[in-house]
Amino acid sequence: MSLHPQHPTTLTIFCKVVDNYGDIGICWRLARQLRHEHGVAVTLWVDDLKSFRRICPGVDLDAERQLVQGVQVRHWRGQDGSHAPGEVDDIVIEFFGCELPPGYVEAMARREPRPVWLNYEGLSAEEWVEGCHRLPSMHPRLKLTKHFFFPGFTDKTGGLLRERAIGAERAAFQSDPGQAQAFLAGLGLAQGEIDAFKVSLFCYPFAPVASLFRAWERGAAPIACLVPEGVAADAVQAFFGKTARAGDSATRGALTVRILPFVAQPDYDRLLWACDLNFVRGEDSWVRAQWANRPFVWHIYLQDENLHHKKLRAFLDRYAVGLDSLKTFSLHWNGAGPGDPQDQDWQALWADLLADMPEMAERAGAWETRMLENGDLATNLLAFAASLR
């Protein structure tokens, strides 16, 4: 899709990294998809190249400007500086209301024709999102209008980020046990861990990980818990009795915990596909878990006044209908249930969740089918931008 027949669509994304890997994770997926599937010339401004490189090893930390997988990456060093109208692209995306540099906004106002300006908002299952999706907001001083663009779970939102080939790639991987075996062995797993019930664990520091570890230790069946380095650091250190590094593993009772290095995004997808249950956090890994065709538990980003609890319940009310064990487990995992999360009977919570795992697996497939009906976010975003012309 091109807004101007004589040249490809150009698009800029401004990304300020707040949640370490979630913000840049989403922006990088969007940038790559727009470039590779839609032929859009994409520039990605990002303020934290170090976080970016952990999910994309090809990033040069010292480069002010670099080409990464066809995307022009610029190091965003602050709000100062002036820009010429010719530097402004057809579409400008302000990710999560990160506030564009004033000089860039001034250049947007002087550009002819003026760009489509979108504020890419956070993903939520709350009903109010449908009413705010596509709403305009006039600039108080300049002749510019910004529109809000919300990802979401219904056809009255922008849908979810999803690449064209992801379903076929996942199906090929999951239908061939040898692929998963080779992938997990490449991450250092011993055969016993590969044969065990495998859990990937990605969460925020306030998750009651130590309590869950104790429940898993006392279980009858072996569990292999795969944790990216630096995640759940306190609980992992207590389990190991030392600071654990990528490649380390330790076993207590039925539980083996293995520390994984951070991997590039395609390998993180494979990790989700290879595990029996995925604990995910924030937004980026949460969406990827929904495309993995596997049961998952979501750890939501902490907000003031427990606003995240309302957001969590809104999603569970859509996703976990009839899965009371998943609802209860998720609420306690996020500190949204009654009582202190550390004081819960995690053995009982886990036993209930494990018993419902077949239903959770079935729900994962049914949910994916429903989400596909809304179209993919990148295509929906370009269609909306074109409609504003």
Image (cartoon, rainbow, N blue to C red):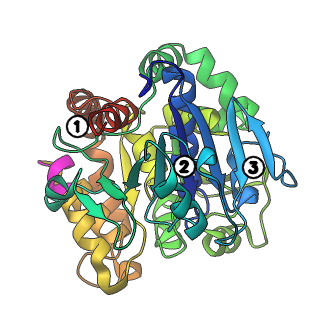
x%, y% of residue 17? 60, 63
User: Considering only order in the chain, which callout, 2 or 3, is on the residue closer to the N terminus?
Assistant: 2
Say whether residue 319 is magenta: yes
Q: Name the disc covering residue 266, or none.
A: none
Picture quadrant where residue 61 is located: bottom right
Q: Which residue is mark 3?
A: 53
Alpha-carbon neighbours of circle 3 within 10 Å: few (<14), some, or many (≥20)?
some
| Comparing labels 3 and 1, the label whose residue is closer to the camera | 3
Alpha-carbon neighbours of circle 2 within 10 Å: few (<14), some, or many (≥20)?
many
Q: Which residue is mark 2?
A: 13
- Any part of residue 263 in sight: no
Stretch of the chain drawn in magenta: 316-321
- Picture residue at 37% right of the left edge, 33% below the top: 382
Q: Which residue is mark 1?
A: 359
In this rendering, the answer to whether 58 lies above or below 122 is above
Mark 3–mark 1 CB contact (< 8 Å) = no
User: Considering only order in the chain, which callout, 1 or 2, is on the residue closer to the N terminus?
Assistant: 2
- Picture residue at 11% right of the left edge, 48% below the top: 322
Q: How many marks?
A: 3
x%, y% of residue 328? 23, 63
| Comparing labels 3 and 2, the label whose residue is closer to the camera | 2
| Comparing labels 2 and 1, the label whose residue is closer to the camera | 2
Which one is nearer the viewer's eye here, 155 or 93? 93
Circle 2 — which element? strand
Which one is nearer the viewer's eye here, 363 or 191? 363
